[in-house]
Image: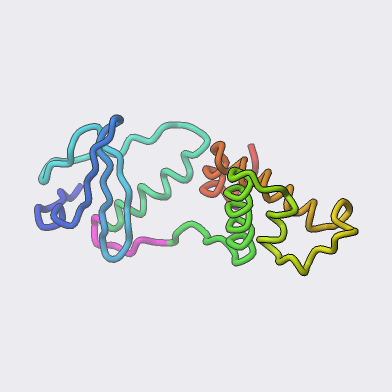
Amino acid sequence: MNAIGLADLSAVKFRQAADGWHAVLRIHGIEHRLWLREPLVAGLPYAAELPLDRDLDIRVHAAGRLWRALNNRPAGPQFPDLSPQQRQRLTLALRALDARIEGNSYRTIAEGLFGAKSITERAWKTHDLRSRTIRLVQDGVALMRGGYLNLLRRGRKRE
């Protein structure tokens, strides 16, 4: 394995946390995030430790991209990006969650997300935007409670 030179270390951003050191390496325009038990030292060889858990394929993919970058090879394919529709839904879910945490009613949240003119007074209880708003809040709560990790697992079969 190639050692990381001191010149490369100057471009690394380090942060110490209770669980170890977090580093962000930018190599050939690609950002790689690392967790280390001890601070990174130039010239020492390093090994990747990958837990044999349900996210092994994601970790192997990321480790392979890092290895290729360190060895001046093309990084290879990245994980698929979110579609515009998925991004829009995530944005709406997080906005709905913020509004609900602030104590707003579903109706107020719907008016903020979709416009007050979209909702007629008489039909609110059966309006499709009411159901959609409730689902968006529920999705936001799920993301807040750890569901955001599923964003890494998108495109994979549920286990």
Residue drawn where x is 59% and y is 64% of the image: 83
Q: Nearer the viewer, residue 51 or 150?
A: 150
Residue drawn where x is 85% and y is 57% of the image: 127
Q: Is residue 18 magenta?
A: no
Name the main secondary structure of what is drawn in magenta.
loop
Residue drawn where x is 45% and y is 31% of the image: 52
Q: Is residue 36 left or right of residue 159?
A: left
Q: Nearer the viewer, residue 13 or 119?
A: 119
Residue drawn where x is 66% and y is 48% of the image: 104
Q: Which residues are magenta?
A: 70-76
Whether 95 is drawn above or below 140: the answer is below
Q: Position of residue 112 (x, y in %)?
A: 66, 61
Q: Is residue 13 left or right of residue 107?
A: left
Whether 117 is drawn above or below 149: the answer is below
Q: Position of residue 89 (x, y in %)?
A: 64, 58
Q: Nearer the viewer, residue 24 or 47?
A: 24
What color scheme is it?
rainbow
